[in-house]
Image: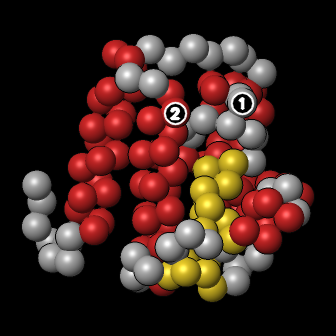
């Protein structure tokens, strides 16, 4: 399995879970950094605090949160606000762990990626299912 495939599935998982957490729907979400209400379809990104090139933290949930286009692209991640909000939401320890791990090189293997992707795909199916009480 390629890392690009795993990253796409993870990013979809992040966006859907943030939509549900912030608005209770899968169609709208609050931007992690500016708080604006954003439609999921095409306008919402999964922004990373430590950029995607840091493979060691690419799939770290605290490092990836839903962001609007303006914050993620125009403001290059709105990093100062992102860092403050990340510490608020996940804690200083999670922040420090991301800083530490981002310095370490990581090459993901198919054996590592496949079970994670399977778990995220299952979670996505569950989130997209209108009857969220039903487990697959």
On screen, residue 129 versus residue 50, left or right, reads left
Q: Residue at x 68, y 37 (%)?
A: 52
Distance from the alpha carbon under mark 2 to that under mark 1: 11 Å
Q: Nearer the viewer, residue 96 or 126?
A: 126
Residues packed near mark 2 inside 10 Å, few (<14), some (14 to 19) or many (20 plus): few
Above or below, 126 relative to 3: below
Q: Is residue 73 above or below residue 44?
A: above
Counting the numbered discs, the total is 2
Q: Residue at x 36, y 34 (%)?
A: 116
Question: Which comes sooner in the sequence, label 2 or label 1?
Answer: 2
Dividing the picture into quadrants, the one containing residue 107 is: top right
Q: Can you identify the residue that label 2 sits on? A: 4
Q: Secondary structure at mark 1?
A: loop
Please identify the quarter of the rendering in which residue 75 is found.
bottom right
Name the disc covering residue 53, or none: 1
Query: Please, which colouring scheme is shown?
Result: secondary structure
Q: Quadrant of residue 80?
A: bottom right
In the image, residue 51 lies at what x, y percent?
74, 39
Residue 123: percent from the left, percent from the top? Answer: 29, 54
Which element carries disc 2, helix, strand or loop? Answer: helix
Bin the neighbour count of mark 1 within 10 Å (Cα to Cα): few under 14, some 14-19, many 20 and up: few
**Residue 48 horizontal side relative to residue 59, left or right:** right
Q: Viewed as shown, does residue 80 lie left or right of 88?
A: right
Query: In the image, residue 58 lies at what x, y percent?
Result: 60, 35
Residue 57 visible in the displayed image: yes
Instruction: Identify the disc placed on residue 17.
Output: none
């Amino acid at each position: 399995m390629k890392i690009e495939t795993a990253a796409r599935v993870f990013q979809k998982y992040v966006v859907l879970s943030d939509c549900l957490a912030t608005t209770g729907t899968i169609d709208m979400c609050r931007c992690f950094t500016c708080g604006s209400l954003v439609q999921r379809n095409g306008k919402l990104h999964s922004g990373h605090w430590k950029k995607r090139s840091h493979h060691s933290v690419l799939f770290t949930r605290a490092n990836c949160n839903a962001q609007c286009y303006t914050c993620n692209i125009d403001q290059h991640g709105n990093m100062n606000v992102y860092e403050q909000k990340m510490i608020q939401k996940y804690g200083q320890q999670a922040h420090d762990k991301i800083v530490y791990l981002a310095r370490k090189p990581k090459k993901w293997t198919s054996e590592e990626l496949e079970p994670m992707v399977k778990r995220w795909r299952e979670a996505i199916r569950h989130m997209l299912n209108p009857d969220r009480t039903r487990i697959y």
